[in-house]
Amino acid sequence: KVAERTAELVAANQELQATIGDLQAEIAARLAAETDLAETEKRYQAVLAQSTEAVLLCDLDTAEIFDTNSRFGELFGFERNDLHSLTLFDLAPQAAEDIQQLLNQVKTRGFMPAQRQTAKHKSGRLVDVEVAATLIRHQNRLAMLLTFRDVTDAVRRERQTLRESALATRVQDALLSLPSASDYIELQAICQPFGYVGGDLYLLDWRYDGMLLRGFQVDVAGHGLAPALHTASLHALL
């Protein structure tokens, strides 16, 4: 009986040691997972902090914004304590249906390529941005990561260029006008620039009371504003 009891105790002890070993292995695995998770979170926070673009994370189902970086606050004027009630709909001047379509697109395709948009500042003014979206997994849930690059200065320069181009077009149209009508000859001219303005120039001018028609045609290589300025200078000189 003593031998049997001893064998039972040995077997029980071995089983206990095995259980303890399993528990230790499980604890070690959990600690390693927690360490990996902590390191991942540190890397994630470092990426957010170092990004020069505004970044936000939002829930794919509710569009609730649950994390941003400091650049987001600088660009749109929101504070960290604004996040508890902030959604993607609050940033978008577009209709709610368009935002829902964006969420569905990211769910389906996993991303949205960069595109020009306008977003609302906390004050209500509109900000010109280039926005892109990516589907990611964050803290065991799917989320949409959006990056915003401020393109306000670029848009302002583009609009200024368009205004200057429109002015250059009007100036060139004026330079390419025909001379007054004549009883002896009918004149017609067609000049279609490759772009908004071109490097072509002609001048027709009646002299000696409409008895002599003089003129010239100039073609400066290239397209756009620079060749047009060259031909305008030639017109002034000639």
Image (cartoon, grey):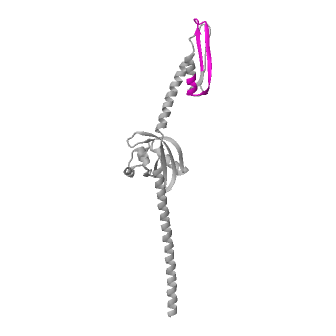
Residue 60 seen in render: no
Picture coordinates of residue 144 (x, y %)?
Answer: 49, 51
Residue 169 seen in render: yes
Q: Residue furthest bottom?
A: 1
Picture coordinates of residue 6 (x, y %)?
Answer: 50, 90
Quarter of the picture holding the C terminus: top right
Q: Residue at x 47, y 58 (%)?
A: 42
In this view, the residue in front, 155 or 57, is 155
In this view, the residue in front, 54 or 135, is 54
> Relative to 210, does residue 15 appear above or below in the rendering?
below
Q: Residue at x 52, y 82 (%)?
A: 14
- Locate residue 75 relative to residue 18 in the image: left or right: left
Q: Residue at x 48, y 47 (%)?
A: 147
> Relative to 41, does residue 99 appear above or below in the rendering?
above
Q: What span is in magenta?
A: 201-230
What is the magenta segment's predominant secondary structure? strand
In this view, the residue in front, 58 or 30, is 30
Tag count: 0
User: Would residue 62 be counted in the magenta stretch?
Assistant: no
> Relative to 130, does residue 12 appear above or below in the rendering?
below
User: Would residue 219 be counted in the magenta stretch?
Assistant: yes
> Relative to 132, does residue 205 appear above or below in the rendering?
above
Q: Residue furthest front?
A: 237
Picture coordinates of residue 76 (x, y %)?
Answer: 41, 44
In this view, the residue in front, 7 or 60, is 7
Picture coordinates of residue 3 (x, y %)?
Answer: 52, 92
Q: Quadrant of residue 126?
A: top left
